[in-house]
Image (cartoon, helix red, strand yellow):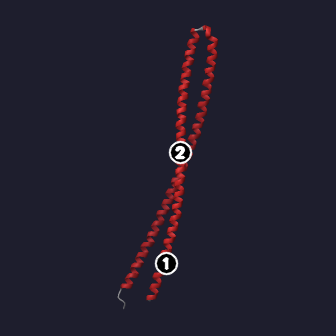
Amino acid sequence: MKNFQQNLLIIVALSLCGLCVYQWYGQTVQRNEIQTLEKMVYEKSAAIQSYTNSIKTMDQQITRMDATITEFKAAAKTNADFVLSQKREINRLQIASETFTNQITEYKQAVATLEAKLKETYDGIQKQNAAMKDLVAQRDEFVKKYNEEVKDRNEVVNKYNELAGQVERMQTAPKK
């Protein structure tokens, strides 16, 4: 009987060692996956920051273009007043007015182009936000599974401790 208990204790100890090695391997794999996910989050955050900076630059360019358009409109009005007061310069001012109109058209086209680029950038950011939400959901699911695994492992350890306590009590109990 004593030999059986020793063999049983050795088997239980080896099983516990095997369980520890298995758990260590599982945690190593999980840590590697977490590091990969964190790297992806970092790269996506950097891309979002880049897009945000690009949007700020485009906003500044749009502001400058709006100011330039306002200046051109003011100049066009001043030129119209000047045309009325100076009949001699009508031909010259008509050419200047056409030039300003062409420039305004070019700026409007530039603004339309920038708006299209902003829309594309906004769509890209929306896609990235969706990807980030998916990534966070995956991470939360992973953490949930990890917590469940840890809970299961803790239950195994508690059962082992109870079994070890029973074995110890059996060994220290007076033999009849």
- Residue at the far bottom: name it: 176
> Callout 1: 10 Å neighbours few (<14), some, many (20+)?
few
**Image spot of residue 134 (x, y percent):** 54, 52
Kindly identify which numbered label has been placed on residue 48: 2
Q: Residue at x 46, y 63 (%)?
A: 147
What residue is disc 1 on? Answer: 14
Q: Are marks 1 and 2 in contact (CB under 8 Å)?
A: no
- Residue 99: name its quadrant: top right
* Front one among 133 and 36: 36
Q: Earlier in the sequence, mark 1 or mark 2?
A: 1
> Callout 2: 10 Å neighbours few (<14), some, many (20+)?
some
Where disc 2 sits, the SS reads helix
Answer above or below: position of 129 versus 176: above
**Disc 1/disc 2 C-alpha distance (Å):** 51 Å
Task: Give, as a three-letter code, the residue at label 1.
Answer: Leu
Answer above or below: position of 150 versus 94: below
Task: Give, as a three-letter code, the residue at label 2.
Answer: Ile
**Image spot of residue 62 (x, y percent):** 55, 31
Quadrant holding the C terminus? bottom left
Q: Residue at x 53, y 61 (%)?
A: 32
Left or right: 103 in relation to 141: right
Q: Residue at x 39, y 80 (%)?
A: 166
**Image spot of residue 47 (x, y percent):** 55, 46
